Amino acid sequence: TKQGLTQKCLEYTKLCELLIPHKEVFKKYVVGLILKYISFLNSGMSPITKSKLIPSIYALLDMCTEFETRQINSMIDVPSRALFAPVFQSYKKYYQYHGQA
């Protein structure tokens, strides 16, 4: 059901946000979670599911250093890169922490 999906996505987002303070421990697993998300994008994830998961993906991306970002980029093929690029660009534009104003 849509309500069940919404609840699961909210729970997953909360879990991802709880990992942020412990990113040094978990960042090696974050790459795998992001790659799994990209594979779901490739398999035709519904727009509703995609939009519900975006906050969790942003939280996961927030844990990545440039090294993990490059690792993800090197592990995906061109079609996957094309699907993930808009997600990453919106993360950089709207979500990424840039320090104090």
Image: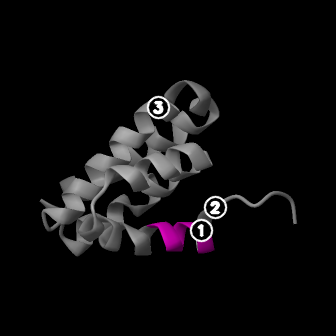
Residue extending furthest toward the right: 101
Residue drawn at x 47%, y 31% is: 28
Q: Determine the secondary structure under disc 2.
A: loop
- Report x, y in % for residue 30: 43, 39
Q: Which sits in the foreground, 13 or 96? A: 96
- What label sits on residue 28 in the rendered view? 3
Q: Determine the secondary structure under disc 1.
A: helix
Residue drawn at x 54%, y 66% is: 91
Residue numbers of the magenta segment? 88-93
Q: Main secondary structure of the magenta part?
A: helix
Is residue 20 visible to the viewer in this orientation of the structure?
A: yes
Q: Is residue 81 above or below residue 7?
A: below
Dot 2 corresponds to which residue?
Answer: 96
Q: Which sits in the foreground, 12 or 6? A: 12
Residues at badges 2 and 1 in contact (C-beta under 8 Å)? yes
Relative to 99, 80 lies left or right: left
